[in-house]
Image (cartoon, grey):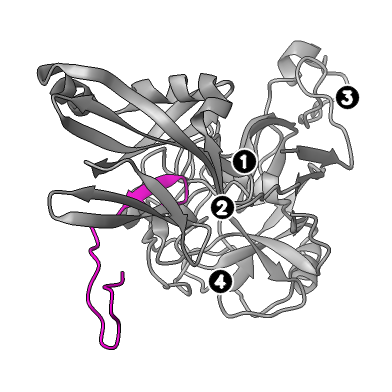
Amino acid sequence: MKRALVAAALFAIGCEGKRLAPEPTDAGEEADPPWVTADREPEPRPGMAWIPPGSLIAGTPPEKLPRVPDEEMAGEQVVMSGFYIDLFPYPNEPGAIPTTNVSQAEAAELCEGQQKRLCTELEWERACKGPQNAAYPYGDTYKPATCMTGSMRNLVPNGVNAGCKSAFGVHDLHGGVWQWTSSQWRRDGSKTNLGTTRGGNAPQGELVGRCANGRGVRSDLRRADVGFRCCAGEPNSFEVVLNVSRGAALTFHPADTKAELARALAPLVPEEIREVVKKRKADHPFEVERIWTWHPLGNEELVLGGGCAKAAGHARCGVVVARMRFDAPVSMAFVPTELWQPTVGETETPRELFVYGGDDNGAFRRRVSYEWGKIGISNKERKKKRKGKKEPTW
């Protein structure tokens, strides 16, 4: 899986980084030494926040959830120079309704009319995440009431949600309109005419309300839910370019072909199963006998280890769902199949699987879903007799 940052320009940051600094007011006044002026913020611009040089952790690291692996970076560090950004969506006035129904080019033209420019998508993300690289504008924990995310509400006056601002003091990054950036949508080798929008609102508030979330929109479209905000200063011209690897939705591997992985998956069964087996004086501990690889969506590969622990004539079976972190599996969920050795089957979408098992009442199955990095497990489903069918069906 390859991810790349393409830089149209390079910026020297750190000890030799360039920052704007006020000129001396008196020609005869001695200038401050470099180590003083280098740490001084530039002159303030009315209605704009200064975002200082620093590092953005772009996208979402694999261990953090929720995340969209085929649309965002996996937590790569991007060193950025300082820039200005509007406090509110255009027209950048508290109490004003954001301007919408403009194309990406029209939004850029309106910014240029104010001697500004559209922000790049990573500038927008840095302004949202703040100096601590938080997941949401207000911190790492999702709070739907802060920005009123989780609905289809879009056209609200600037500043209505007073607490909806980042640590850099930038307001209304979420909970209102989606916002054009100057960036093109370069995911999965896409060559279509898509521009990148950030922010916005949707029923999936925990997912959409993250600073890393983006959406590709045809750049010539004018939508009632898409506005913009402006930036100023030398642009950070980095682009997000993702090569997306998909693979087969589900692939079976006999455990003996992946013996080392099978041994690594076995200890990931829940503690309660190990305790029950221990009390029953197990013939052998949980042993992974079947392995599958699962690609629920692009740039995401999970491993599933199915097996049983046999204790005093009574088996405890199930499937471990894990993600590989470097060379070691990290547990995401355990799907119990009780008395039966598990089998796994595909559904109508790669994001869901069926895990089959059995108990004292016979066969059952559970639907296992991939929910933006989390694993959802349904209740048991049983076969039912259908009209005109000799045998019961699911």
In this rendered view, identify the residue nearer to me: 268 or 306.
Answer: 306
Q: Nearer the viewer, mark 3 or mark 1?
A: 1
Amino acid bearing label 1: Arg
Q: Can residue 337 be seen in this view?
A: yes
C-alpha span from label 4 to label 2: 20 Å
Q: Which of marks 2 and 3 is nearer the N terminus?
A: 3
List the residue tagged with mark 4: 98
C-alpha span from label 1 to label 2: 12 Å
Residue at 15 percent of width and 29 percent of height: 313
Q: Nearer the viewer, mark 4 or mark 2?
A: 2
Left or right: residue 168 compared with residue 71:
left
List the residue tagged with mark 1: 126
Q: Which of marks 4 and 2 is nearer the N terminus?
A: 4
SS class, disc 2 = loop
C-alpha span from label 4 to label 1: 21 Å
Q: Which of marks 1 and 2 is in front?
A: 2
SS class, disc 3 = loop
SS assignment for the magenta stretch, majority: loop
In this rendered view, identify the residue nearer to me: 362 or 376.
Answer: 362
**x, y (%) of residue 267?**
35, 20
Task: Please check the rendered image and state whether residue 78 is part of the magenta-colored stretch, yes or no.
Answer: no
* Res. 345 image quadrant: bottom left
**x, y (%) of residue 325?**
54, 26
List the residue tagged with mark 3: 27
Is disc 3 surrounded by few (<14), some (14 to 19) or many (20+) residues within 10 Å?
A: few
Is 42 above or below relative to 194? above
In this rendered view, identify the residue nearer to me: 35 or 305.
Answer: 305
List the residue tagged with mark 2: 213
Amino acid bearing label 2: Asn
Q: What stretch of residues is rendered in magenta?
A: 370-394
Q: Nearer the viewer, mark 4 or mark 1?
A: 1
